[in-house]
Amino acid sequence: MHSAPNALRPHIEWGLQSILGTWLTLQWRDQPCAPGTYRTTVEFRDVRGSAAKIASALRGWHYLRFEVREESELGGEFYRSTPELGIHRASIDGLGNIVVTEHQITEALAKGFDDLSIRDAIDEILGNQWERELAPFREVEIDQIIQLRAI
């Protein structure tokens, strides 16, 4: 969870508890990229398809920025969401790389054969708009980890 308003924090916890079937107490921290919001990280092991349930539940709250990954050696799913862009879903391989299917390539080519059309379609498939918007929020977490390791 990259950013969530204070008022939604208990609702997010309740929603995750309901989906995962276990009690959660999340450690929320200030999100400096969006003053007045909070961020947290949750790692869990559950049955396949849990990421889709979590992303579906969270996307109902417009003000959230989040990412949900379901990973295995065989691959999984990756969901990203922002208030402005909505939700993006991608299939990933066992290393976390986004997998582009034949169907997606065919759709991209159907939109036009000029360079700009193809670039825009591939940009959409890869979720690069979501990546650009969420990168500063993700970097806050990475910077904090680096600072803790330096101590």
Image (cartoon, helix red, strand yellow):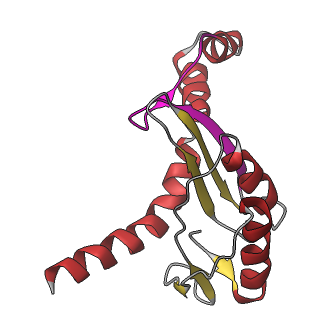
Describe residue 138's horizontal placement relative to residue 123 as left or right. Answer: left
Nearest to the observer: residue 46 or residue 137: 46
In the displayed orientation, state which residue is furthest to the right: 60
Give the vertical position of 100 relative to 9 (above or below).
above
Residue 85 placement (x, y as % from top left): 70, 53
Task: Look at the image and say whether residue 92 sits in the magenta stretch.
Answer: yes
The answer to which quarter of the image holds residue 3 is bottom right
User: Between 114 and 124, which is closer to the camera in this rendering?
Assistant: 124
Left or right of 86 on screen, residue 151: left
Whether residue 82 is situated above or below residue 41 in the rendered picture:
above
Along the line of sight, which residue is nearer the eye, 71 or 67?
71
Q: Residue 101 falls in which quadrant of the image?
A: top right
* Residue 56 position within the rendered picture, expressed as x and y whole percent measured from the top left: 79, 52
Residue drawn at x 24%, y 74% is 146
For image coordinates 33% across by 79% down, the residue present is: 144
Residue at 60% over, 14% down: 105
Q: What residue sits 52% from the left and 18% below the top? A: 115
Measured as percent of width and height from the top left, residue 62 is found at 80, 66
Q: Quick check: 37 left or right of 97?
A: right
Task: Report which quarter residue 5 is drawn in.
Answer: bottom right
Instruction: Indicate the quadrant containing the N terminus: top left, top right, bottom left or bottom right.
Output: bottom right
Q: Residue 122 at what x, y percent from top left?
A: 55, 26
The boundaries of the magenta stretch are 85-102
Residue in front for this viewpoint, 55 or 19: 19
Is residue 108 in the magenta section? no
